[in-house]
Amino acid sequence: MKLLSNSKPQFTYENNKLYIPVKMKFMISHLFSCLWLILSIYLALPWLRDLSHIVSLPIALLIIGGISYIPGYMNAFLVISVILDRQPLFKTEYPNDEITILIAAYNEEDKIFQTLKYINEQDYKGKIKVFVINNCSNDQTVQEVLRAKKELAIKIELLHENARGKFHALNRGLKVVTTPYAITVDADTLLHQSSIRYLVSRMKSSPNDVCAVAGSVLVKNSRDNLWTKVQEWDYFLGIASIKRLQGLYQGTLVAQGAYSLYKTECVKEVGGWPDAIGEDIVLTWRLLEKNWKVYFEPTAVSFTEVPSTFKHFVTQRARWARGMIEGLKEIKPWDHSQMYVKYLTGINLLMPYLDIIYTLCWIPGLILAFFGFYWIVGPMTLLVLPLTLVSFSILYFYQKKYVFKRLNLRIRKNFIGFFFFIVFYQIIMSPVSVYGYIQEVFKLKRHWK
């Protein structure tokens, strides 16, 4: 794969397939999304006129923009980008570089041994050294790590960090890393047997300015209850599609701590993991600020345990929303050096506005619509739904054909979870995100778990 040196984007062929440069994909995606935006504005003129008679024109524009215009534009951009995305081939599928895995553990007695066992069963040919950093556990976590050290073949070292906080634990581990690559794995995350091999292969097949590769995180406990069934689709379709979009434009915004690979020297250069509730978000943005790139590898699959209770879910997602605000406060979108990262973080800058409008306007408007008052929610709002279904369908077949088939995995039938994901998930997510924004604004107490 190569880009021609001319100033204008050009098409080339690789392996008899049309290759479109990233810059051209970006332009094509924007063209279609802008056309969709223009069409939605035109079709929504009657809706705008009716609503402006009730709340004034500026407020009507603010509401409809947050409910229809911007979400429609973003969905169109996502759809076209996903269609145009072509993951480059690996230069090698069997790297043998020595790597270090860091696992921060707090009260993980029922999970840590299994996590280490799955690492032990990797088909990666290089040396793997695992550091488990015990972060003030008061259960049998230490004993389980010692049992794994005795029974498993991989090299495991147990470290202790008395300062509470995941970032403290990871930085404790970073001090002893001597390998060129470090991988973070959550204590409740299980890796597919080829996961590390594909994650390192993506890094080894990438340009030198790529400093991190985010792995693909899916749900392992989706059978627990309806709530985990819904989250299965969020990880499989929602989060994965965003990761593919961002990876296409070389600016994956979160190399998540649950499972990602980093160049050790790059993490050390930016000072390690920051004192932030979204430590992986802020770290990734610090890396991007250095003009490095962050990729995403969909075949480097891992399975994590998602919240099975609503309270735990709210804590987790509010923490994610709060972490995004931390990142925006530290590094403004316009401070990034890469055009694509400026754009992607700029979208994040709009998220609080969209979540607030959805929470304060769309949800009450939906209630009003049940009583026949279509002031806010009406037929025009359904224009976003086809694009959402199209984008999810595209990603579903991509995941099935290029990821799950390659890894000999099977997509579980989960129709009930999918229905609730499509119909109700955003109604819950936006208020939870707003709650996270409020936590950050008022500097409320942090909760990592």
Image (spheres, helix red, strand yellow):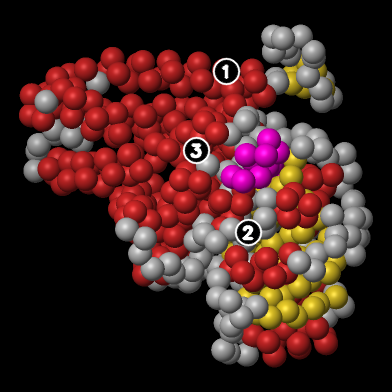
SS for dot 3: loop
Where residue 181 appears, x then y in whole percent?
81, 55
Question: Left or right: where does residue 142 sit relative to residue 432?
Answer: right
Report the disc number at residue 114. Answer: none
Report the disc number at residue 273. Answer: 2
Residue that label 3 marks: 332
Kind of residue sitting beneath label 3: Lys
Where residue 84 appears, x then y in whole percent?
63, 26
Extent of the magenta region:
285-299
- Name the residue: 32% across, 20% down: 40
Report the disc number at residue 27. Answer: 1
**Mark found first going from the N terminus, 3 or 2:** 2
Q: Nearer the viewer, residue 126 or 300?
A: 126
Kind of residue sitting beneath label 1: Met
Kind of residue sitting beneath label 2: Trp
Q: Nearer the viewer, residue 194 or 414?
A: 194
Pointers 3 and 2 in contact (C-beta within 8 Å): no
Q: How many marks?
A: 3
Residue 218 shows in this picture: no
Please tell me in which quadrant of the rendered image residue 191 appears.
bottom right
Q: Residues within 10 Å of mark 3 (few under 14, many from 20)?
A: some
